[in-house]
Amino acid sequence: MPFQSRKDQFHLPIGMIYLDGNSLGPLPRAAADRVGRTMVDEWGDMLITGWNKAGWMAQPMALGDRIGRLIGAEAGHVTLGDTLSIKVFQALSAALAMTDRKVILSDSGNFPSDLYIAEGLIRAFDRDLELRVVAPEDVAAHITDEVAVLMLTQVDYRTGRLHDMAALTAQAQAAGIVTVWDLAHSAGALAVDVAGCNADFAVGCTYKYLNGGPGAPAFIYVAPRHAQTAAPVLAGWLGHDAPFAFEPTYRPGEGVARMRVGTPPVIQMAALEAAMDVWDGVDMTDIRDASITLTQRFIAGVEAACPQLELASPRDPQTRGSQVSFRHAEGYAAMQACIAHGVVGDFRAPDIMRFGFTPLFIDEGDVDAAVAVIARVMNEKLWDDPQFQARSAVT
Amino acid sequence: MPFQSRKDQFHLPIGMIYLDGNSLGPLPRAAADRVGRTMVDEWGDMLITGWNKAGWMAQPMALGDRIGRLIGAEAGHVTLGDTLSIKVFQALSAALAMTDRKVILSDSGNFPSDLYIAEGLIRAFDRDLELRVVAPEDVAAHITDEVAVLMLTQVDYRTGRLHDMAALTAQAQAAGIVTVWDLAHSAGALAVDVAGCNADFAVGCTYKYLNGGPGAPAFIYVAPRHAQTAAPVLAGWLGHDAPFAFEPTYRPGEGVARMRVGTPPVIQMAALEAAMDVWDGVDMTDIRDASITLTQRFIAGVEAACPQLELASPRDPQTRGSQVSFRHAEGYAAMQACIAHGVVGDFRAPDIMRFGFTPLFIDEGDVDAAVAVIARVMNEKLWDDPQFQARSAVT
């Protein structure tokens, strides 16, 4: 249990094995006090002076650096705010402004919202842009000099399939393509290295593996070589070079700070700050090693006990993120039964039972206990149990 | 003191008269507990099930209705999320999609961020759009059939000058123009009536007069006649008709719900919910009456005591929002001295001392006490006092 001291820092409901930290991370114990202080000592007592005195205005860049360390970003090149969809829009629109080509290449394993954002942008920008969505395994073959932007989510939210970020980025850049990486299921889960991969833009959320809480702000990374030229389409005042000069005309701020838009979410940032404290001193290669140990143990355990479950995730841990998915025709009902019996994963249509592994608070004992529950649920078809159904009906 | 019972519901630092609620409203006493419950009982204990069990997913529309009541919106036509700059972008881009005309008309009294957002949008949309910024008093004369969208902030953030929203909307619509109103300094300050004015789009923030806290989310209103056709350029998954079906293609949600983008800011919403509880049962015409009484009393008091201050706000309360601004060459230093002596307003370049009046927690006694402090500061030039300067240097 390499992260026991971290596990102790989370509020984890008794009797629950929470394998859904890839959807919403759990509450860091210190977060409630931290938020309480921001509410009363900062907002309550400092009022408007909190923007400077309490450092609210500086938080998006300060927290950006702490997240930046976990994704291999250069200091000063990550900022925080808004939601991931907005950050995807910012990255994609800035990437498109760097090229006259027309094709946005993505894959069908991308999170739908990223594709929706591209669609909305294409409808609004009068540039004959085209969104080309291919199967994940066909991406490399579609990297041609027609493509303007390669926009991918590194880890497939359903299967956990992991793209080779370094290889695809290199191949794309050799073809003159700008890259936008969505790290929603990577940040805090893998040893991402945006600088080492030479990524152009990267975005992600902080409420999954980073444990920033429901509604926690998103982040955006702009490579240093683009930071002073990237076009901020969402040109908000906090991305201005001098927000409090109230100049009539927009001048983009220094570097990635231009990707700030409106007033930062101070209370959400306080929760995220407490969450980032838990990450202090954690090495992402240790997390990745622990994650592989956990997912391998889980797959071995489930496959030995439940032959009726079909592995939907890659078997090779090197091509898998920090989640394991199994297919089953009655997956929805089966997952409800697992949850009712204390193992919380989630279900993704049409037949995917998804389990996330988060080494900060899940250890091998949890994996073994989860396998035992899943085995009982699947082998005894507990979802058919009238007692369970009666319970489900009232919850 | 018509709102004494409301005043008691705020955490107001002792010895401070807070005339800056038009910048950041104070902490509602119940908000800290409300947020604490969301942190521990909801996020902590419910984890992922909080999205449904705790009603997080429904909050943006529920809170939208509570704000809608204060701005005269039809139920179900306001939603919440993101920041005001993002909501301006959404409203402006949707308005532009309704017309082939090229001119966005605004005024130099608009908040700069709204103009920046228009500039960013114009650069990105390849449509030969033009941002035409005129003096506030010249807006009516520039309403021609060349204009696509009239985008105005109802109350000038520096002077408090109030546009006649009903008259300008009617004039604009007669010329085939779509209207976008920014209610940042109106919501919770005036008896706004977006439905009665026939406004097309309206947006606003909730951290000023509504007291939602630093980083509180923004709101957007789309007139019912546009709700099913308005184009969501920021096409995020929570604006999709079926977000959890994870369909590959975007289908806009029902009505204004399509203006939702990403995951809602759950913790900020909890604070805002407590703030909206204070508004329950408050009639905006009573607020407006009280506000006029306070601002008239303040102007009379300051003008009688401080002939060196020049009124920068309209003298007629019917053309003034809920703030009063005075000009003074040494306004910055003078405001610092006022703050040091317990009267908190703020300064806007080049020479504006700005005071906001928020009847929920400011009463006539506060006005008289503030006038006495301001009179002493101005007449004794307290900012020249070496003792004050020494104090200022360390804070």
Image: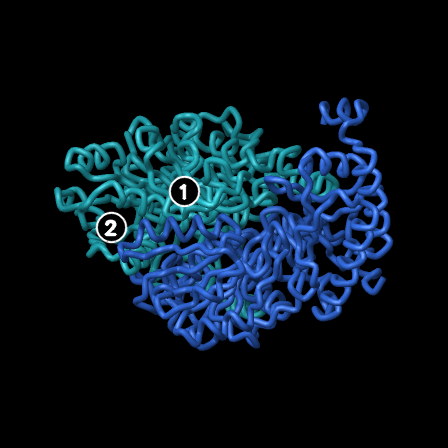
Chain colours: A blue, B cyan
- What residue type is disc 2 on? Asp
Mark sitting on residue B204:
1
**Residue B287 visible in the picture:** no
Secondary element type, mark 2: strand
- Comparing A102 with A96, the one in front is A102
Question: The N terminus of chain A appears in which quarter of the rendering?
Answer: bottom right
Chain identity of mark 1: B
Labels in figure, total: 2
Reply above or below: B189 against A247: above
- Comparing B83 with B231, the one in front is B231
B251 to the left or right of A322:
left
- Comparing A263 with A220, the one in front is A220
- The residue where tag 2 is placed is B107
Please determine if labels 1 and 2 lie on a single subunit.
yes
The residue drawn where x is 42% and y is 48% is B84
Is the residue under label 2 in contact with that under label 1 (CB below 8 Å)? no
Give the alpha-carbon distance from disc 1 to disc 2, as whole Å: 17 Å
A19 to the left or right of B325:
right
The residue drawn where x is 45% and y is 71% is A172
Secondary element type, mark 1: strand
Pick whichever of labels 1 and 2 is earlier in the sequence.
Answer: 2
**Residue A141 visible in the picture:** yes
Q: Residues within 10 Å of mark 1 (few under 14, many from 20)?
A: many
Q: Position of residue A164 (x, y in %)?
A: 58, 68
- Comparing A29 with A370, the one in front is A370
- What residue type is disc 1 on? Gly
Mark sitting on residue B65:
none
